[in-house]
Amino acid sequence: MAKKIHLTLNVNDEHKELLIDPRRSLLDVLRNDLELRGAHRGCDSGDCGACTVILNGKAITSCMTLAADCDGDTVITVEGITPVDGLHPVQKALVEEGGIQCGFCTTGMVMTAVALLDQNPHPTIEEVREGLAGNLCRCTGYKKIAEAILSVERK
Amino acid sequence: MEAKETRETLSFIFMVIGQRIPKLDAPDKATGRTVYGHDVKLAGMLHGRILYSQYASAKIKRVDVSRALKLNGVKAILTAEDNPPTKFGYGKDNVPIKGDVVRSLRDEVAAVAAVDADTAAEALDLIEVEYEPLIPLFDAREAMKADAPLIHPERKSNLFQKYKYSHGDVATGERESDVIVEADFELPYVAHAAMETSVVIASFDHRDHLTLYSTTQIPFLLQRDLAEALGIEGNDIRIIQTAIGGAFGRGLDIYPYEPIAALLARKAGKPVRISFSRHEEFLAAPMRQPALIHARAGAKRDGKITFRDAYALLDVGAYISWGSVTPLVMMETTASLYRVPHVKFEADCVYTNNLITGAVRGYGNPQSTFYTETLMERLAQALNIDPVDFRLRNANIPNEENQQGLIITSCGLKECIEAVAARADSGLRIADGESRKASNQSFRSSAISHQPSAIKRGIGFASTLNVGGGARIYRSDGCGATVKVDDFGHVSLITGSTEIGQGSETILAQIVAEVLGVKVEDVNVLNSDTDVKPWDVGVHASRTTFIAGNAAHIAAMDARRQLFETASELLKAKPEELVARDGFIVETRNGASLPLEKVARARHYREGGKVILGEGWYDPPTKLVDKDTYKGNISATYGFGTQMAEVEVDTETGKVRVLRLVCANDVGRAINPMAVEGQIEGGAQMGLGYALTEELIVKEGRVMNPDFLDYRLFTSADMPEVESIIIETDDPQGPFGAKGVGEMGGTPTAAAIANAIHDATGVWLTQLPMTPERVLKALEEQGKEGK
């Protein structure tokens, strides 16, 4: 067991002080230490995007991010963008446009899309497709996901 | 049929059938509230890890776990000594932990339960295994030879099963043929690549009853199989299905990690979770088996097919799972896609020291549709007949029992072919001024191919036939359902069938809501616990909408009958004068109405009162195929579809870009068109991968590309325009006329793309995936022949 280290994070607008194993990924810390299980482990190698969260304003794969490197950083997870009542416009769009089947990739898709729309509020379909290319989905064929993201402004 | 009778009594103005209703489970999935297997945490739960063999074929001389046992945090270690005496799996040839011999690199030689996953992994490193390597067999052709080493010596042969099917007489078909085409095909291993890896949690209670949290698709068969594997009784096992993060056939059999988790949990006295890493998933989950196929077909000058003859050699790996039954589906495509008077199909399923193979969406059909439909295209070329016309001349027709014994009732194949053909003239071709009709050209786009550019464009077609009304591969193909209406008018559907992402929960809720006249969101669906739900054979064979849908429909009709019975007393009307609408039971003559809850309470709170509890069981009127001839009506109805691919081939790099995929599917009736499109579009993603990018490269039994960087799924940026066309044929036995669609989305894609590549370049691709290297090689060979 490696010696534990101290980690300070701002997660979903809450200040967190943690004592963690320095080998832990951000995904591990979110899922296990903070019980935020909306970020999913699909590959543990940064290939599938199911673990996507927003770190300091940027969508990243939390499985490939060492938690120890995030000291003092700001993390937003799917739990952080979900309103107490109802859904975030991106979530609402994915639900209504049929962009969700098994749902395992969905939370990662949501976070990628939130970051994408933050940086580019009026994307073209090509920009959406490119922007989601790091998030794999095995169920939907992506069409309804991309259409949902495009429809967010209208929601 | 009960379903048919009840359907006729219903109004044909549907309230929720045919609506684009969002999935009921989608909001929780969008917000991260859904609990998948990976999210389940039980008190005191341990983490299990499996040690796999280092050799594909070896004797195990010694396993020493003493060092691992001393590691702090290790709670239990399993070796072959802990195995119950029985074997399990479809072929009854597997055990949890391998003892004397390992037969593949995915063979389990030990397993550890520890306080966390890292400790378990560390413990695996401390287990010493001494092997004596044996000569491995990696080639199915070698395995067929008489002097080949035996994978399972007690079986006396590596040939697990031989399939021999025929109808008509192929020799006669050959004599009648004006043209005969043939080719050899080579098809790869393919992974389900569900986004969630395999996961299981096993927990025993004080009575020694096992609860298994599982992503299985066959909870009731797993109860039986697991009991057998553990040497306990089925009623000692409760299966709870967690939310399932994709399945696609992965969960259709018992696999070793499930009894291993249970044995570890029993040995440690604590719940144990085993969750696969992605690497492990690519190694140990059951793959689509590779196949070597030789196929021939003939046709007459008038455009009628005369015969088909195919032989498939399937490498089913070291242990038998459902991969060995896929020839049943291959023979169905070979024998029954289009009307073919003379057919022969043979297949050999052979043991090797390769990976275990199982069911993957389409279940043999993507393979057989690839050879069948590319041969169709070759016949059309050889006859110089428009490929669309050729297909139309041979298309299956409604209300015909064919020579295989399939009773085809509703059939929209012609409509599917025509619908995609109509789209061939639109879109990009029009943009190029290349409208086929305008120039009266054949589908061979010679004008485009003659462009000086290295980029060649082409279109190709392929159709598919798939079971759409269940598939009787077990003595029951049934599903049970209960519909409950409580004192608050709240409706619960308890169904045997499971949501695996495909949307069955919502479809079944729509069926119940339509019958009871309530909103879809007012129907709660319970479908995940074998202690609660009635039996179902499993989520496979595109059967849920049809089979579980009929069961839910029958149960809802029973609940409605009870509501009408009580309401007729209260409203002083005959039951046949009542309808259920907007949460009320309404008297049609005078409009008098009662809310559902009032009727339910009136029935309940009286002397001799009862609650509203509708019962449904549906087992389709089908047969197991004859064990010698393989003939018989396996499904209550059949689904059809046609796809058209438009591709660009870069003849300098070999890269194929699909520009457009138009998919028409006969689904009987689309209970939820958005969900149907989702199945077609998602199927297309798998079909595109099968065609162009997906191949699990297995060298000497070892997976060379066990990650998503090297096993390439289509991403959102790779996808072409996918257009779905829904053809409705109102199936006579389907719930509200619906039939299955789950697997058809991907079955014809590879053939349509191969045909489009041929249209563009004149070369035939016979090996999947059609990678740039393979396309270039085919183009080079064409160049050599040209000289």
Image: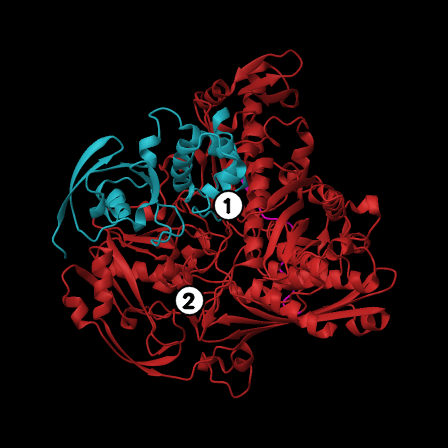
Specify the segment rendered in magenta: B616-628
| Quadrant position of residue A71 | top left
The C terminus of chain B lies in quadrant: bottom right
Does the stretch in magenta take in B620? Answer: yes
Q: Examine the rendered structure and indicate whether residue A155 appears above or below residue B267.
A: above
Chain identifier for the cyan-coloured part of the image: A
Residue B302 as seen in the image, left or right of residue A18: right
Q: Farthest residue to the front: give it.
A: B452
Q: Sequence-wise, which precedes: disc 2 or disc 1?
A: 2
Magenta portion: prevailing SS class: loop
Chain identifier for the red-coloured part of the image: B
Chain ID, mark 2: B
* Dots 2 and 1 on the same chain: yes
Q: Is residue B77 visible?
A: yes
Badge 2 local density, few (<14 within 10 Å), some, or many (20+)?
many
Chain ID, mark 1: B
The numbered disc on residue B716 is 1
The numbered disc on residue B88 is 2
Q: Position of residue B344 (x, y in %)?
A: 72, 70
Q: Is residue B474 visible?
A: no
Q: Residue at x 66, y 45 (%)?
A: B662
Q: Position of residue B620 (x, y in %)?
A: 62, 49
Does the stretch in magenta take in A123? Answer: no
The N terminus of chain B lies in quadrant: top right
